Image: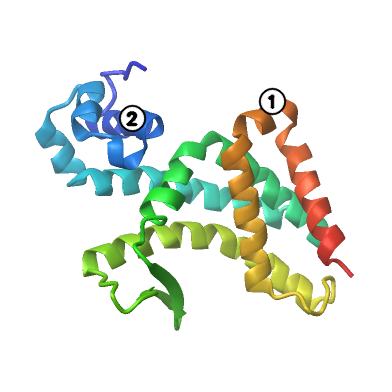
Amino acid sequence: MAIDTSLPKDIRILQAAEEVFSQHGYEKATLDEIIALADVGKGTVYKYFGNKEHLFYKLVADKNAPFLEKLHQAVNSVDSFEEKLKKYFEVMVHFYIANSTLWQIICFEMLGGTNGCRVEPDGDDFKVIPRYNSVKVSEETSERILRYHKILHDEYDILAQLITKAMQDNLLKEDTVPEITTKFVFFGVAMSIFNQSDDIAADMTDEEAARIITDHFLRGNAR
């Protein structure tokens, strides 16, 4: 992939970073390769982004912001719970297929390597809790985990609000637990896309995939 050298340097670095991270994952990606592809000096990367982790976070955060906006717009464009679900999953499927590798890095490298930690609610925020007494979590590690947890939380919280409202409107079975149900559905869809994004993209449209997901959800949970 060639980077347009007429672009601003920070944009070139982000484009190069997306290419390198998508090819190699986070741990095996190197700043040297990103620098070479972007055709900038090493000092330029540090000037704009500080280090590799901050560069990766900037890359995915810049993608996540318009994704969240599209999710909100989609669910607000229709009235019924079923149509809201379809619109939500249509946008999610499209985004996760397009950004499958980067979001796998979030799930499996930035959050998967949490060394025996879990994230729990803490008032209006979240905190990182060691699962075992022997696990020590540095402040830097805790901050990293929470940064990437927030990206995913903001995505599935929109779905959680839909499911909670449907419960209040007696549209779902009374034993449905919104938080658990949301995570089962959201991460189930995400993992399915991670494992077969090429097949899904080749065999069906985003709308067809969203209809299948919605139908399966409602068949198991609707009254």
User: The residue tagged with tag 1: helix, strand or loop?
Assistant: helix
Q: Residue 32's image quarter?
A: top left
In the image: residue 46, left or right of residue 151: left
> Which of the pair 91/179 is nearer the observer?
179
**Mark 1: amino acid:** Ala
* Residue located farthest toward the bottom when viewing the structure as drawn: 123
Residue 79 seen in render: no
* Residue located farthest toward the top when viewing the structure as drawn: 2
The image shows residue 123 at horizontal and vertical percentages of: 45, 83
Q: Is residue 100 above or below residue 154?
A: above
Q: In this view, does 91 lie above or below 142?
A: above
**Mark 2: amino acid:** Val
User: The residue tagged with tag 2: helix, strand or loop?
Assistant: helix
Q: How many labels does the image show?
A: 2
The image shows residue 41 at horizontal and vertical percentages of: 12, 28
Sequence-first tag of 2 and 1: 2
The image shows residue 33 at horizontal and vertical percentages of: 23, 27
Residue appearing at x 31%, y 79% in the figure: 133
Q: Residue 45's image quarter?
A: top left
Q: Is residue 15 above or below residue 186?
A: above
The image shows residue 139 at horizontal and vertical percentages of: 23, 69
Pointer 2 residue = 20
> Which of the pair 190/162 is nearer the observer?
190
10 Å neighbourhood of mark 2: few (<14), some, or many (≥20)? many
> Which of the pair 173/40 is nearer the observer?
173
In the image: residue 63, left or right of residue 164: left
Q: Which label is found at residue 202?
A: 1
Q: Residue 4's image quarter?
A: top left
